[in-house]
Amino acid sequence: MHCKDRTGRRVEGGEGQDRFLQRLYGARVGRACVKVLIQPWVSRLGGRVLNSGFSRVGIPRFIEKNKIDMSQYEERHFHSYNDFFMRRIKPEMRPVSMEPTHLIAPCDSRLTVHEITENSRFHIKGTAYTLESLLRDKALARAYDGGTLLLFRLTVDDYHRYCYVDSGEKSKNHWLPGVFHTVNPAAAAVYPIYKENTRCYSFIESENFGRILQMEVGALMVGKIVNYEEAARVARGSEKGRFEFGGSTIVVVLPRRSCVIDADILANSRAGIETKVKYGERIGCKETCCGEDT
C-alpha cells in the first residue's frame, strides 16, 4: 500500500517488515519457524537479548538504514536496543492540538479510515478482522455500527509512544491474548494460518467525541504493549503508553456521527493510500463544529 504525507507527497519505505512477515507466514518453512519463535521461552529469550547491553551494537546501523534524525530526540545513553526503541522525542517536535473540537492522532503512523458495518473487514498485521472478531464481543461491536474505525500502522522506524486522543474518563484495560494456529500446513499457495496478535483496549468517555474505544495491537513474537494506567481521568495528548520492540498498530473506534475526518485523509483511504500522520496533530473535527472550523 502506498503512503502520502499531509501535503500529498509520496512517502517511501515502511514496507520491509510487512514483506518479511508475508514471506514468513506464506511459506511452510517460515510457519514452522514462527511456531517455534512464539513459544514463551523463546519470547523471553528474545526479550533478554533486546534488553541486553550487547544489543546496542545494532543501534547505529538501524539509525543509518532508516534515516532517523536523532536531533529530534532527547539526548541520553541507551543501555540496550529496546531502550533505544523506546526513545523519547523532544516535546517541541510533537506539538499537540489542544483545540477541543479537533480529533488528534495518537501516534506517528500511517493512517487509514474505515466505515464500520457488520460485514466490514480490517486488515491488521496480515489478518482480516471484523470489528466483532477484533473485539471478541458481538454486542460491543454492534454498538459502533455506522461509526468509524481509524487504523494507525506504526513501522519499526516510527516513534513508539502514544497518547490519548481526547480528554475524559478512561476505563480499565481489557486484554485479549494472541493466538497462532496452523490450519492447513500442507498448503503453500495461500496463507494456511490463523493468527491474532495480542491486543489491549479501553474506553474513553470523551469530552468531545462520545465513547471512544482505543486499542493497541502488539507484535506477535517479542513485541510488548505497556499501558501506564487503569481507570483514570485522562487528558488529550498525555502519554498513554508505549510499545517495546516490534512494529505495532493502534485502532481508534468512534461512534456514529461523532467526528468528520479531514478530507485529505478520507480521499487517500478511499484510493487505498495510507496517510502519514504525527503524534498530536489534527486528523478530524467534531461533527457539530466542522462547518465553522478550518
Image (cartoon, rainbow, N blue to C red):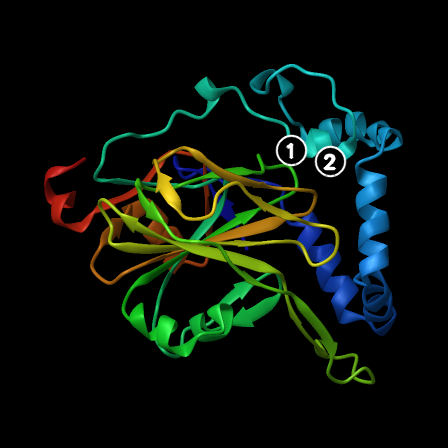
Q: Check the image and report above or below for 267 versus 157.
A: below
Q: Position of residue 205 (x, y in %)?
A: 29, 51
What residue is pinned by disc 1? 86
Q: Residue at x 30, y 71 (%)?
A: 143
233 vs 230, left or right, is left
User: How many numbered dots are placed on residues in this image?
Assistant: 2
* Residue type beneath disc 2: Asn
Q: Residue at x 36, y 39 (%)?
A: 234
Contact between labelled residues 1 and 2, with CB atoms less than 8 Å apart: yes
* Residue type beneath disc 1: Met
Q: Quadrant of the C terminus?
A: top left
> What crowding class fits label 1: few (fewer than 14 Cα within 10 Å), some (14-19), or many (20 or more)?
some
Identify the image quadrant of residue 60. Answer: top right
Q: Position of residue 25 (x, y in %)?
A: 75, 67
Q: Residue at x 17, y 50 (%)?
A: 287
Q: Position of residue 264 (x, y in %)?
A: 33, 45
Q: Position of residue 98 (x, y in %)?
A: 28, 30
Mark 1 falls on what kind of element? loop
Identify the image quadrant of residue 158. Answer: top right
Q: Which mark, by number, is residue 292?
A: none
Q: Quadrant of the N terminus?
A: bottom right
> What crowding class fits label 2: few (fewer than 14 Cα within 10 Å), some (14-19), or many (20 or more)?
many
77 vs 200, left or right, is right
165 vs 186, left or right, is left
Identify the image quadrant of residue 106. Answer: top left
Q: Check the image and report above or below for 115 versus 194.
A: above
110 vs 286, left or right, is right
* In-front residue for pair 65/73: 73
Q: Check the image and report above or below for 294 versus 259.
A: above
What residue is pinned by disc 2? 82
Mark 2 falls on what kind of element? helix
Rounded to the nearest whole Å, what is the CA distance between mark 2 and mark 1? 6 Å
